[in-house]
Amino acid sequence: MKEAINPPKSSTPKAFFLSLILLSLFYLIFLSLQSKHPNSGHRTITINGLKIRPGYTSYDTYIHHQLHKTTNPKLRKIWTSRDWDRKIRVFTRFFSQLKQEKLLTNSSKALCVGARVGQEVEALKRVGVNDSIGLDLVPYPPIVIKGDFHHQPFDDKTFDFEFSNVFDHALYPDKFVGEIERTLKPGGICVLHVAISRRADKYSANDLYSIEPLKKLFNGSDLVRSRKVDGFGLDTEVAFENLQVLVLDRKWSVHCPILLHCNPVDYGPSSFKFFNSWLHVEGFDDVLIGVASKFVVNP
Ligand SMILES: C[S@@+](CC[C@H](N)C(=O)[O-])C[C@H]1O[C@@H](n2cnc3c(N)ncnc32)[C@H](O)[C@@H]1O
Ligand SMILES: *[C@@H]1O[C@H](CO)[C@@H](O)[C@H](O)[C@H]1NC(C)=O
Ligand SMILES: *[C@@H]1O[C@H](CO)[C@@H](O)[C@H](O)[C@H]1NC(C)=O
Ligand SMILES: *[C@@H]1O[C@H](CO)[C@@H](O)[C@H](O)[C@H]1NC(C)=O
């Protein structure tokens, strides 16, 4: 029995136990370093139709991977020269359409999440939405400021409108959406461009297979609409409206339990109405005959 558990001749039992202790020590140090990380402990969500890509061993690995492309000087040169006007033109079309739908107005305070060099911010300004800013890990002053979309550097209820085409870059999609809902004002609009029927690029952190996961994640919002688009490899545009929650003082809520929330909806020009009472107005018959005679074709 004793022989069986004896370590190889080259090392003594003492050395064997010493290395065992050392190994466990290293393992403990490794664990404690891991838990120092701000995002460890955040459990990745599991929702049908949304897959978080494996392979990001830590939050730093994820950020490092994201920065790899965004900080590339040659690419930044291309994005700000050759690509600049081309992308602004496409974004301008999208935002003009949203203005027509009244989801965006000139007076909206707008944020573009994951804006890189900010062509979408520039497009918003060009369609008249002057109060627009972008957010990205890498700033591009003055139109894009530095920040992580998992922890937006803005106060609650700051924006009327948020646009993003980088949902697929979110390692924690619930945080990505939670931060948008937090920084949107009640009634604010969020428009996302996402890839549903094709896989996004190698810098993505998740893959989306339908818009159902988005509806689950936006649990403080209503889906306004979704449509197919052609936006730089992203094929679906969804629009959400942040729900209005109004907590009344107790003394008021007792007397006024019903709150009406009115949305301005444009139903187009109002239709012509004819009122019976007009028939009783003196001289109305003559007006009618006079007008009608213009349309009578003699046989
Ligand atoms: C595919 S690019 C999109 C750039 C831009 N929206 C466009 O259409 O030209 C993705 C961008 O998301 C940024 N990004 C990735 N992870 C981020 C994070 N956690 N917080 C903020 N930005 C992030 C990257 O730096 C990169 O600029
Ligand atoms: C919004 O701004 C654009 C561009 O400056 C301008 O052409 C348009 O008339 C403005 N729209 C309204 C409703 O003020
Ligand atoms: C928005 O900016 C444009 C260009 O700088 C300017 O002509 C326009 O008057 C501004 N609109 C508002 C509402 O400030
Ligand atoms: C909405 O989702 C977030 C995160 O995905 C969660 O923390 C929160 O509890 C949910 N709220 C409701 C009302 O379900």
Image (tube, grey):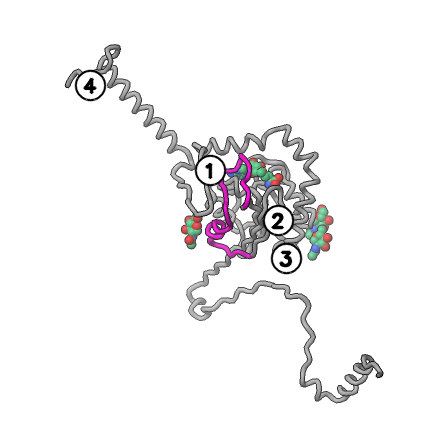
| Residue labelled with disc 3 | 101
* Separation of marks 2 and 3 at Cα, in angstroms: 15 Å
Q: Earlier in the sequence, mark 2 or mark 4?
A: 4
Bounds of the magenta segment:
197-224
Q: Name the side, left or right, on which 42 lies relative to 209.
A: left
Q: Is residue 115 visible?
A: no
Q: Secondary structure at mark 2?
A: strand
Q: Nearer the viewer, residue 173 or 282?
A: 173
The residue mark sitting in front, 3 or 4, is 4
Q: Earlier in the sequence, mark 1 or mark 4?
A: 4
Q: Is residue 17 magenta?
A: no
Q: Nearer the viewer, residue 133 or 199?
A: 199
Q: What residue lies at 75% left-to-right and 89% top-to-bottom?
A: 282
User: What amino acid is labelled 2 in the image?
Assistant: Val
Quarter of the C terminus within the rendering? bottom right
| Residue labelled with disc 4 | 5
| Residue labelled with disc 2 | 229
Q: Which mark is residue 53?
A: 1
Crowding at mark 2 (Cα within 10 Å: few <14, some 14-19, many 20+): some
Q: Secondary structure at mark 4?
A: helix
User: On screen, 222 above or below 178?
Assistant: below
Q: Earlier in the sequence, mark 2 or mark 3?
A: 3
Q: Position of residue 10 (x, y in %)?
A: 26, 10
User: On screen, 98 above or below 271?
Assistant: above
Q: Position of residue 166 (x, y in %)?
A: 55, 42
Q: What residue lies at 76% left-to-right and 87% top-to-bottom?
A: 285
Q: Is residue 116 visible?
A: yes
Q: Earlier in the sequence, mark 2 or mark 1?
A: 1
